[in-house]
Amino acid sequence: MPRYDFLVESYRTERLKTLSVWSQVPDGRMTFRPEPRARTPLEHMVHQCVSEDTWMRSMLGISVSRPALPPEETRAAFLEHYA
């Protein structure tokens, strides 16, 4: 097994955990802010997608074929895009 194959599996399982949590957020709560300093679920989804896109391209040199964000910022669109 190549040296870094475990990273692919680790990333896959972390991605599934993220999708599982995101799927639990009701559409009507996407802009809910639990605390003034906290992100809303929508803000977190944007942050997650943009950060991972930047990490893949800049830090790992991986060519990403899709834009960082889905064309529509809805829960369903983020779930499909991130999956």
Image: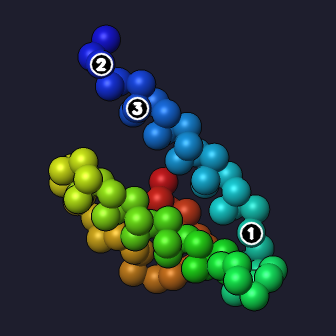
Side of 41 where 82 appears, left or right: left
The residue most toward the right is 34
| Residue for point 56% across, 43% down | 14
Cα separation between marks 2 and 1? 37 Å
Do the residues bearing badges 2 and 1 touch, measured as CB atoms within 8 Å?
A: no
Q: Is residue 1 visible?
A: yes
Q: Secondary structure at mark 3?
A: helix
Do the residues bearing badges 2 and 3 touch, measured as CB atoms within 8 Å?
A: no
Q: Amino acid at mark 3?
A: Leu
Q: Amino acid at mark 1?
A: Val
**First of labels 3, 1 by sequence position:** 3
Label 3: which residue?
A: 7
| Residue for point 47% across, 59% down | 82
**Quarter where residue 1 is shown:** top left
Q: Secondary structure at mark 1?
A: loop
**Crowding at label 1, few (<14), some or many (≥20) Cα neighbours within 10 Å?**
some
The numbered disc on residue 3 is: 2
Q: Give the percent coordinates (x, y) of residue 56.
A: 29, 54
Label 1: which residue?
A: 25
Q: Give the percent coordinates (x, y) of residue 73.
A: 51, 82
Q: Amino acid at mark 2?
A: Arg
Side of 79 where 50 appears, left or right: left
Q: Is residue 30 visible?
A: no
Cα separation between marks 3 and 1? 28 Å
Q: Give the percent coordinates (x, y) of residue 72.
A: 46, 83
